[in-house]
Image (cartoon, grey):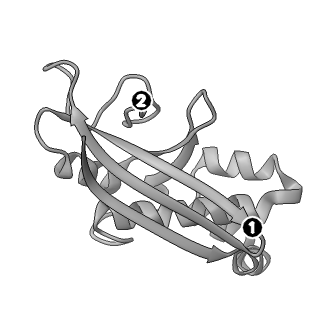
Amino acid sequence: MTILGVGSDLIDIRRVEETLARFGERFIQRVFTEVERARAERRPHDRASTYAKRFAAKEACAKALGTGIRRGVFWRDMGVVNLSSGQPTMALTGGAASRLVAMTPPGCVAEIHVSLTDDFPLAQSFVVISAVASVSASEPAAIGSRAPEGVRQPP
């Protein structure tokens, strides 16, 4: 296994609460994927912290990709999804997926490891992107078969 990128982010949940109050649906639609929105809206008592953790994960992922939110990588190109075990990971599309493929060595598959936590008033995320040798020569780089949307499930 080779580590390709590491990112972390810490955010004040109260800042997300204020942004939700001020911009509401406009902010939510601009930044979060449908999966992320559905999860947050199922948790009305924990809505702001759910969004804050996912916002921190997007920031951490953009850092791990080495781009930040620029160079063709947009907020909704990165979405927190949960594997069947409940473990969080990232589903990448658009510019973020393209960047992941570009940074993954030939013959390898990318894995995205995500850690989310919150303790009011803070939410935090760590993202580690690693590469492992592909199980089969026919498997394309950075695409796995067991995880959602272009991410290989960590072992």
In the rendered image, residue 147, in percent from the top left (x then y), is placed at 45, 29
Where 98 falls versus 11 (above or below)? above
Where 104 falls versus 123 (above or below)? above
Q: Earlier in the sequence, mark 1 or mark 2?
A: 1
Left or right: where 26 falls relative to 129? right
Residue ID at (79%, 59%): 47
Q: Secondary structure at mark 1?
A: strand
Q: Secondary structure at mark 2?
A: loop
Quadrant holding the C terminus: top left
User: How many residues crowd around disc 1 within 10 Å: few (fewer than 14), some, or many (20 or more)?
Assistant: few
In the rendered image, residue 28, in percent from the top left (x then y), is placed at 65, 63
As measured in the structure, the alpha-carbon distance from the residue carrying label 1 to the one carrying label 2 is 28 Å
Residue named by callout 2: 155
Left or right: where 73 falls relative to 31? left
Type of the residue with mark 1: Asp
Residue named by callout 1: 119
Cβ–Cβ under 8 Å for marks 1 and 2: no
Q: Quarter-wise, where is residue 35 in the image?
A: top right
Q: Quarter-wise, where is residue 29 in the image?
A: bottom right
Residue ID at (74%, 71%): 24
